[in-house]
Image (cartoon, rainbow, N blue to C red):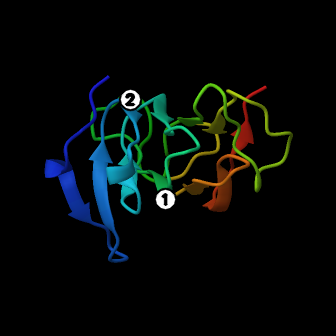
Amino acid sequence: MANPANSTAAILPDGRQSVQVTEAKTLAITDSGIVQNVAYASAVITLPATATDGVYIIRNAGVAEGGSAGSGDDGNQISISPNASDNIAGGVTGTATDNKDLINTAATARVGDEMTVKLGLAGGPIITSYSGVWAREA
């Protein structure tokens, strides 16, 4: 899985720096603080291991015109996957479990739905804010 280069960087209308994500991506420390603007169907974004410090922002950008999912305000499904030995605590209803994703399902997703996750804490990744409807993987 390749990671899109920052050559796809842009400024969102709210002034934040973003990068357009059009394929599966494993985040790295260099992605911290940059909005990952996810624009493809059935997206999977993998967080780095807990020891990697940073704040990671994943935003639903919908699917580009001609894509197989999302149109208008409709978003696309995004799965945020922790490192296999980590769980993502906080925010979303349900029990945080190792190696289980947070999912912004296509049925409820809207362009602009976001999840912000803080890493580098001893207890593992924690949700610091989110918008939209997100669920924990069963």
Is label 2 in a helix, a strand or a loop?
loop
Residue 16 seen in render: yes
Instruction: Name which residue lies at 76% across and 56% down.
Output: 91
The residue mark sitting in front, 1 or 2, is: 2
Q: Between residues 89 and 80, which one lies in front from this camera angle?
A: 89
- Closer to the N terminus: mark 1 or mark 2? 2
Quadrant of res 113? bottom right
- Up-down: is 43 above or below 34? above
Instruction: Name which residue lies at 41% across and 44% down.
Output: 71
- Counting from the top left corner in percent of width and height, residue 20 is at 28, 48
The answer to whether residue 23 is left or right of residue 71 is left
Residue 104 seen in render: no
Q: Which residue is mark 1?
A: 112
> In the rendered view of the protein, which quadrant contains the N terminus?
top left
Q: Give the residue type that dot 1 points to.
A: Gly
Crowding around mark 2 (Cα neighbors within 10 Å: few <14, some 14 to 19, many 20+) is some
Q: Which residue is mark 2?
A: 24
- Up-down: is 1 above or below 90? above
- Counting from the top left corner in percent of width and height, residue 88 is at 69, 43
Q: CA distance from mark 1 to mark 2?
A: 19 Å
Instruction: Name which residue lies at 38% across and 50% down.
Output: 29
| Residue at the left extreme of this rendering | 7
- Counting from the top left corner in percent of width and height, residue 87 is at 71, 37
Crowding around mark 1 (Cα neighbors within 10 Å: few <14, some 14 to 19, many 20+) is some
The answer to whether residue 138 is left or right of residue 113 is right
Q: Give the residue type that dot 2 points to.
A: Ala
